[in-house]
Amino acid sequence: MAERSSTERALRRYGPIAVVLVLVVGVIAIVGGGDDGDESATNGREGAESDLPVIFQEAEAAGDEIDFGDSCDTERGRLKVPIRNAAPCIEAWEEGADNGGATTQGVTADAIKVVVYQGDPDPLQQALVSSSGADTDPAVNAQTRVDYLEMFADVYETYGRELDIEIVEATGDGGDATAAQADARTVIDLKPFAVVGGPTQTPVFWQEVTNAGILCVGNCSLAEGWDNVEGAAPYLWPTGPAPEQADVHLAEMLGKQLVGKPAEFAGDPELQDQERVFGWVQAETETGEYAARNDEFDKVFAEEYEGEIAARSTYLFDPGAAQETATTVIARMRDAGVTTVILSVDPLVPKAITEEATKQGYFPEWVMGPSVLADTTTFGRTFDQRQWANAIGISLPPARADNSLSDSYFVYEWYYGTEPPTNTQAVQFAGPDRLMLGIHLAGPELTPETFEQGLFRYPVNEPGKTYTRTSWGDEFWGRPDYNSTDDVAAFWWDPEATGETENGVEGTGMIRYVDGGTRHLPGEWPEEPLPFFEEEGSVTVYDELPEGDALPEYPAWPGSPASES
């Protein structure tokens, strides 16, 4: 699933595991967005204040009658492309009209230069990913990104320009800063408008290319904090929420659902009648860079929800030290009288932590916060089930559905007439989708600034259950937002449920999404108790998309490979 939480940055030294995160669980909401135009609104700058193209939703609100062309679905206000967040219709652009020519680096009157970064060939990483069931061939994955770019260049507006795509192969693994810097210099020398992807476990790559005035889109890095992304504006466009956004949701869920109430979900009956006492186990970096964010969380948690973190235990991710970490963590939690342990962790250490808790006869509640892969069925089955039977949490990804029901799979087959060549197509889809959407909305005068203005005007919709609410802009979060996902769901662990993990392994123990995966926006978490540990109304995996989440269906795009087959 992409770039998902604050702790992901703590894993930069451990590229293989972080890439398993992206590839195994890559079908998360990196391709989210709403499906109908009825509730749409723009989130930021208005087209009337610039030379940007007029979009359907703006024209409708103003009562203007504009020709949006035959490719516009006027029921949705979006192009006839079968994905939920398809580009909004824009005022028809006359072929051959003046597009401004060479408007910025990598852009001429006829072409837009785009680099596709081809992932690293590290053998250990490939072995780990292969064992998870994910396709690993870097060349196939890179070519799939190219396929999506070429598809979007056909169905979206590029104002008379074609894509000039070049693949740059990685020279080291995702955490190799020296190789990342060298790869960045290679990209910079090509003078593109944008690069899609990059080494995800070090910030060096995106820092170098954005400093050179090149857009870095999609999986250029794992989750970066607001200040880092805003400081690189308008060049860095990550996938998924910022760490601070995830923290907002965690504080609100805890405050509205758990604070001041008995620890009823604890495994120990003696704890179930006690008012909750919170402890937090958190992966950390060697420089302790999360200290400031922790202080801000504690302040908000106390002032807005009268909550308190009674004990905090941080650790550096090192599988070899997992048992030592577990012993320290459980001792600290027990000594502080913690009834409710919050986890913001990697996917491996919780196994040792939960086993140590059982060894010491300590059975608290467990709450999964923003974490790396630990909030998946794949790794949840590895934790001590006597402990994990008492686990709830927030889910940044949406409720799971069969892979063939995803936007990325469906639209590839719709355009090319064949299934995607890799089962990690959702990961390959995200960057091309975002880049081409921004180009479509930027208008003929393409620059990094108009790209930003275009995405800031993207029409926003309410979330579904198997997709997320996507937005960019100045309004929703109270500051410029260059990330995407705004909402989260809630889940609980069902130790008796059977089914497949995210990578297709049958077994027992599954994440159950509360209320079918209903997603919550900040400020909208309910005060009434959520139905944790109530099977009725919950879901593990959708075999069919729920009502309201269905993908739109259109004939094959004229001139596409599927239309000619």
Image (tube, rainbow, N blue to C red):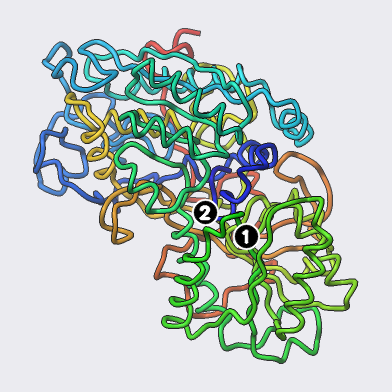
Q: Residue at x 70, y 57 (%)?
A: 511
Q: Which mark is residue 47?
A: none
Mark 2: amino acid: Lys
> Is residue 532 left or right of 88 when viewed as pictured?
right
506 relative to 564, above or below: below
Mark 1: amino acid: Tyr
In the orientation shown, which residue stands out farthest toward the top?
A: 564
Q: Quadrant of the N terminus?
A: top right
484 relative to 289, above or below: above
Q: Residue at x 72, y 86 (%)?
A: 337
Specify the quadrant of the image occupied by residue 71: top left
In the orientation shown, which residue stands out farthest toward the right?
A: 359
**Disc 1 and disc 2 in contact, CB within 8 angstroms:** yes
Q: Secondary structure at mark 1?
A: strand
The residue that label 1 is drawn on is: 513
> Is residue 78 left or right of 365 when viewed as pictured?
left
Residue 11 location in percent, x, y? 63, 47
The residue that label 2 is drawn on is: 465
Q: Secondary structure at mark 2?
A: loop
Residue 423 location in percent, x, y? 65, 29
Distance from the alpha carbon under mark 1 to that under mark 2: 9 Å
Specify the quadrant of the image occupied by residue 458: top left
